[in-house]
Image (cartoon, rainbow, N blue to C red):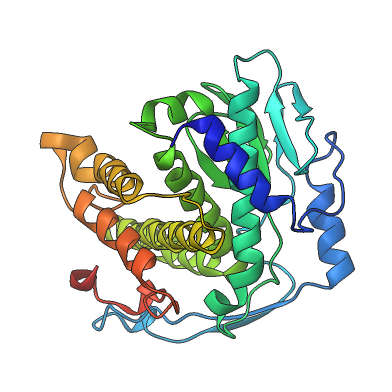
Amino acid sequence: MNLSKKIIIALSLLCTSALFTGCISSSVMSDYYNESKRAKGYSNQTEDGYDTEKSEEEYQESTSQTGNEYSYIKYDIDILDDYDEYDNDYIDDVYYIVGQDITQSEMDYYSMIMALLDQYWSEDYDNARDNTGGYDYFKPILVVYRDEINLLLEGEEAVRSGCFYTSGILFVDSAQMEDVSMDSVAPIDYVMAHEYGHHIQNLLGDMDMVSKRQYKMIAKRDNVGANRLNIRLELQADYYAGRFCDYLEDLGDANDTEILSVDNIVEIIAAADSIGDDVIMGSYYSAELSDHGTADQRKRWFMNGYKDDDFKKRNIFDLNDEQL
């Protein structure tokens, strides 16, 4: 399905939903989260259930944590480049970098996918949460840029590129999205849903748990163990992307239209295959260097989510490495 037709169909589905409330000042990106947090009194309670290393008692013990802070959710990120708010009538909290070649149709599409992601997760977040604690659901901000972006993150300046998630903000690199698109824009859906999945992990406390365990592992020079934990995060984000794509299919069926076709799913699987560590690294690949998962793992976990209607396979941190 071409880009313009897909936007029209999706917007027609969105226009009947009261999804978007509130506004955010483009001058201070963190205000939205600080105010939301105070207004709703967010609290969290997480339990660390990662116990696959049977020989390492330090990594087996279950720890509970209560309070109002996750170390991984940060509100002090600033964009050092000039940016503007995207002018549109159907979604807020969308920004793009001034002076870069980002088209109106691109912005329409990225914003539309974000709207659908918010619609899905606002409905299904509690199922993924499954009484495990974490923040109540709130949507991330979308920032679209091209080629590279200059950030002040944790007090340090950093130039980043590619699509990524951090600190409640989903960053989309339009140049990378051009590369990932194949015969349709379906791979863009996958990439954005994967990055949005990291936001869900952030809210649920999985990122915080992994960060703390990685710190302990790296202190013991167990870089391989730290990488394997990161693989679990990435594969779980692929799983969440699969859940979203299943939702898009169901949404189309319910409205007697087609949002994702079988051919689109094949394209997404091909995209997942192309970003496996073994494919990217080629002859330099080794299990010790891998930190995002192999092509087979990434395809498998996308399909795990695509076929799993009740989130039974979400708990990737309960599995042994050979089960990934």
* Residue 208 in sight: yes
Residue drawn at x 45%, y 64% is 243
Q: What is the quadrant of residue 85 in the picture?
A: top right
Question: Residue 118: x, y in percent?
Answer: 65, 57
Q: What is the quadrant of residue 82 in the picture?
A: top right
Looking at the rendered image, the quarter that the C terminus falls into is bottom left
* Residue 157 in sight: no
- Say how many tags the image has: 0
Q: Is residue 282 above or below residue 202?
A: above
Asked whether 257 or 277 is in front, the reply is: 257
Q: Is residue 19 above or below residue 277?
A: below
Residue drawn at x 87%, y 39% is 25
Looking at the rendered image, the quarter that the N terminus falls into is top left
Question: Residue 50: x, y in percent?
Answer: 39, 78
Query: Which residue ends up furthest to the left in the rendered image?
Result: 283
Q: Is residue 37 above or below residue 87?
A: below
Residue drawn at x 52%, y 57% is 256
Question: Residue 212: x, y in percent?
Answer: 50, 66
Q: Is residue 28 above or below residue 158?
A: below
**Position of residue 54 in the picture relative to residue 131 (left or right):** left
Query: Which residue ends up furthest to the front in the rendered image?
Result: 256
**Position of residue 44 in the picture relative to residue 117 (left or right):** right
Residue drawn at x 20%, y 54% is 296
Question: Residue 138: x, y in percent?
Answer: 71, 62
**Position of residue 181 in the picture relative to residue 122 (left or right):** left
**Position of residue 230 in the picture relative to residue 203 (left or right):** left
